[in-house]
Amino acid sequence: MKKSTNLIAFLIAFSLHVLLGGLLLMNIDFSLPKEKPKEAVSIIDASLVSQKMFDDLAERKTKKKLLEQRKKDDAQKKKEREKADRKRKELEKKRKDALIKKQKLDKIKAEKADAARKEKEAKRVAAEKMLAEKKLKQKKADEKRALAKKKALAKEKEAEKIKAEKIKAEKVKAEKEKAEKVKAEKAKAEKAKAEKVKAEKAKAEKERLRQSELDKQMEAEFSNDFSNARSAKQLSEIAKYEALIRKKISRHWKVDPSMSGKSCTLGIRLAPDGLVISANMSRGDKKLCNSARRATLQAKTLPIPKDPELAPQFRDFDITLEPEL
């Protein structure tokens, strides 16, 4: 309504300006102007009034345009704000919908997981229950078997105890008899051993005396033999005892005709008292050396010089032997 009023006022003012302009053109005198002071003032006043009206109208028009442009700008800004609000609301709605959807999915997932967990737990409980029942059943069966076994074992132990006591009694009796028998046998054995030791000692003493006597006889025979063959000054002590050693070995040496013309060298070791420690083949016929070695060991002791300077030479020495056939 306001816009229509302004438009009518503008048209009226514009019409007046056109009318006044036409009247002015009709009254223009193209000749030299005459002095009409009063009329000039009227024309100037009318022009001023018309210009003022035109300026006011232009100003109002400009203001109107500015107002309309501001309204358009405000409307555009409002429209943009509304559009931004709609976009923000749509985005917020999408986010909200996505969140709701996610929450729903999470809820479904959680419910499924919870259901699976509950199902797993139920299965575990059922399995444990079944296992517990199985164990209880097995325990009862084991207890029953154990009781039966215990009874049978007790019965068996009782029988074994009776049997063991009987065996023990028999064993004690047998051990007693055995001990008495062993005691008697031991006494008999000790007696026999004592007699044997006594006999061996007597035999050893007899042998020692015999060997001593033989050594004396041999030494006497050797001295007689060599005293007839050469003087004592010509025979050294070493040759003398070597001859004595050969003579004693030959006393135990078993030879046969196949050994004729053969010789053997033995390595002999003696103790300080003449006891034979070892006799080993050094060189010569093997068969002859073996028999000479046995004869040397059977001799047990060999004569050695009493001279402390010569005796060490007969601790470890070699001697060559030849059989007398």
Image (cartoon, helix red, strand yellow):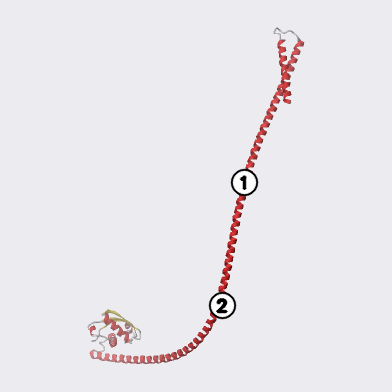
Name the spot of residue 180 as percent of width and height, x first.
47, 90
The answer to whether residue 304 is visible is: no
Helix, strand or loop for disc 2 = helix
Could you give the CA–CA distance between mark 2 and mark 1, rounded to whole angstroms? 73 Å
Q: Residue furthest right?
A: 38
Tell me: residue 94, above or below residue 47.
below
Asked if the residue at tag 1 contacts the one at tag 2, i.e. Cβ–Cβ closer than 8 Å, the answer is: no
Foreground tag (2 vs 1) = 2
Picture coordinates of residue 181 (x, y %)? 45, 90
Marker disc for residue 151: 2
Badge 2 crowding class, 10 Å Cα cut-off, few under 14, some 14 to 19, many 20 or more, is few
Q: Sequence-wise, which precedes: disc 2 or disc 1? A: 1
**Residue 53 x, y percent position in the rendering:** 73, 19
The kind of residue on which mark 2 rests is: Lys
Secondary structure type for disc 1: helix
- Residue depicted at x 72% and y 20%: 11
In this picture, residue 216 sits left or right of residue 176: left
Say left or right for 41 vs 259: right
- Between 86 and 124, the one lying in front of the other is 124
Label placed on residue 101? 1
Residue nearest the viewer, comparing 286 with 300: 286
The amino acid pointed to by label 1 is Lys
